Image: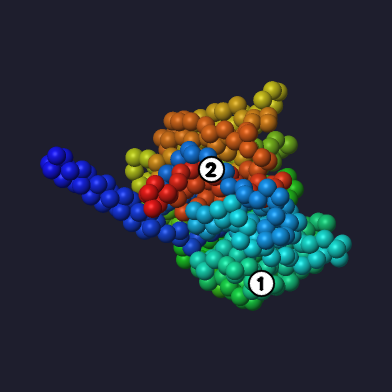
Amino acid sequence: MHITTNIYRIFLLVGSLFLSSVLLESCAKQKPLENYNFYGGASRASNYELSGSFSTMIITDVPKDAAKKNNGEALPNGAATPPIPITFNHNYLASTDGYALRYANNKLEWKSPLDELPSGKRAVAASFPCADVNDNFYLLANDGALYSFDKTGKRRSKQALFTPSAQSFFSDLLLLKNGIITAFSANGTNGTLIKLDADGKTEWRKEYTLAPTRTIAADEQENIVMGLSHNESGKSDSVLSLAPNGSVRWAVQLAETRITKSPVLGGGVSSGGASGAGIVLLAGIRERNGERTDILLALDAQTGKTLWEKPLTFAPQGMSIGSQASSNEPLIVVAGYRVGVGEPLTLLYGFDQSGKELWRLSYDLAVIGAPMIGEENIAFVGTKGDAVGVYIMRKDGVFQQVISLSDAPLLCLIPGVDVQNNLVFAMTEQLGLIKVGSLPAQRLLPY
C-alpha cells in the first residue's frame, strides 16, 4: 500500500510538472504586436506559425442574460467587422449600430458610441480595425474619422481625416510598432495615405491620383508596400514601397494589369520564420488584345523588380506566405475559385518562392478570404450553398477534415486569430462569438 501511494504521488508530480511546462509554454507564446492586424500581421501574410497549429473544438460565446441586457442597458447589435482577439477570452468588436465594444466570457465589458452622422445614425466601422499591445483599439469609421479607445472603453482620440461621399473607399488599418497607417479614396478615384502616431496625430500625408487597394503591408523594418488602382480593367495599376518616413523606395507600373489582391510580404521579410530573399506577392487581371488572364506576380521587396509571374485559371481570393512542412523554405499558398456552369470550384495551390508548384487541391465550394498557415497545418473558410465550414489541411497539401459551422448563427466569415490559433468568428445579427480551436491548458486544471 505504501509503495502504491508513493507511485501515485510520483504520478501526480510528473503530471503537475507536465501541466506546468504546458502552461509556461503557453504563457511564452505572447501575441506579437503585428498580429493585432488582420491577415497575419503587418506583412498581411496570413502566417500564424509562431502561435502553433489550428485545432477543431467549437466554442460558443454568447451573452448569458436571456433578456439581452447588460447592466440594465440593451446590448449592441451584431458585428460590422471581424473581431480583434486580445486574449483567449477578450475581444474587441465594432457593432452595426455604431459602438466600439469589448467582450469576454459571455459578457459585454463595455460599449462606447461613435459620433452621429448628419442622418442622426451613429457612424460605423468602414474597414477592418486593429489594436496595439497596450490594448488600445483603433477603427476607421464611415464619417471619415479615425477613433481610438483604451482598454477601459474611454475614447483616447478622434482624428477627422476627410469628408466621405457615396463613392468613398476605405482601406483596412495597418498597425506598425510606432503608429497607424490608414488609406482611403474620398471620391473613389484619388487616393490618400496617412501615417499617424499612437495618439492619432498625423506624422505625414501623401496624395495620389489613383485609389489605394483594400490592404497595405509592411516589413519588419516598417517599409510600406501598397497598391494603387484605376479600378478599371485594361489600365496599368501601380505598386510602390515607402520608407517609414514616407519617402519613396521604389514604384512599379504593372502593364495592362488591374490589381485584384493587395500586396503580401514574405519569404524572409516578415513571414514568421521563412527564409530567403523578401518578396511582394500580389494578384491581378491582365487584359491584352481583348483577352483577360488572372495572374500571380512576385516582386523583389527591395527593388520592386519582377521575379516571376504565373497565369492562373481562377480568380485568387487570398494569398498566404509561410514555411514548408519539411523545411524552413517559404511556402506560398494561393486560394481562389471559378464559377461556370454548376457549382463553384475552389483551387488551392502551394508554390515555393521561385513559383514552382508543390501541390494542388480542389474543392466544390467557394473559398472565403486567405488561407491561414499554422505551425503544422493550414485552415481556410469555405461555403457551399448555405453550408459553411472551416477546412483543415496539412502543409504538404493533404486534406485532413472539415468543421461545420452551418448550425451557427449568421457570421462574419473572415475570422480573427487569437494567441493560441483559435479562429474567432463574430456573429452579425446578434452579439456573440463562435470559436474554432481549443481550450487553453489552464482550463484543464481542477482549480
User: At numbered mark 2, what does the secondary structure look like: helix, strand or loop?
Assistant: strand
Q: Point out residue 176 in the picture as x, y percentages from the top left corner.
A: 53, 66
As drawn, 399 above or below 90: above
Q: Nearer the viewer, residue 352 or 124?
A: 124
Query: Pointer 2: what residue?
Result: 59
Query: Pointer 1: what residue?
Result: 155
What residue is at 16 percent from the left and 45 percent from the top? 6
Instruction: Tell me the CA gap for discs 1 and 2.
Output: 31 Å
Crowd band around label 1 with a 10 angstrom C-alpha radius: few (<14), some (14–19), many (20+):
some
Crowd band around label 2 with a 10 angstrom C-alpha radius: few (<14), some (14–19), many (20+):
some
Q: Is residue 319 left or right of residue 193?
A: left
* Position of the N terminus by quadrant: top left
* Amino acid bearing label 2: Ile
What residue is at 20 percent from the left and 47 percent from the top? 9
The number of callouts visible is: 2
* Amino acid bearing label 1: Arg
What residue is at 70 percent from the left and 72 percent from the top? 158
Marks 1 and 2 close (CB-CB < 8 Å):
no
Residue 259 seen in the current view: no
Mark 1 or 2, nearer chain start: 2
Q: Is residue 262 left or right of residue 321?
A: right
What residue is at 47 percent from the left and 66 percent from the top? 221
As drawn, 222 above or below 346: below
* Disc marking residue 320: none
As drawn, 299 above or below 120: above
Q: Point out residue 384 in the picture as x, y percentages from the top left corner.
A: 64, 30
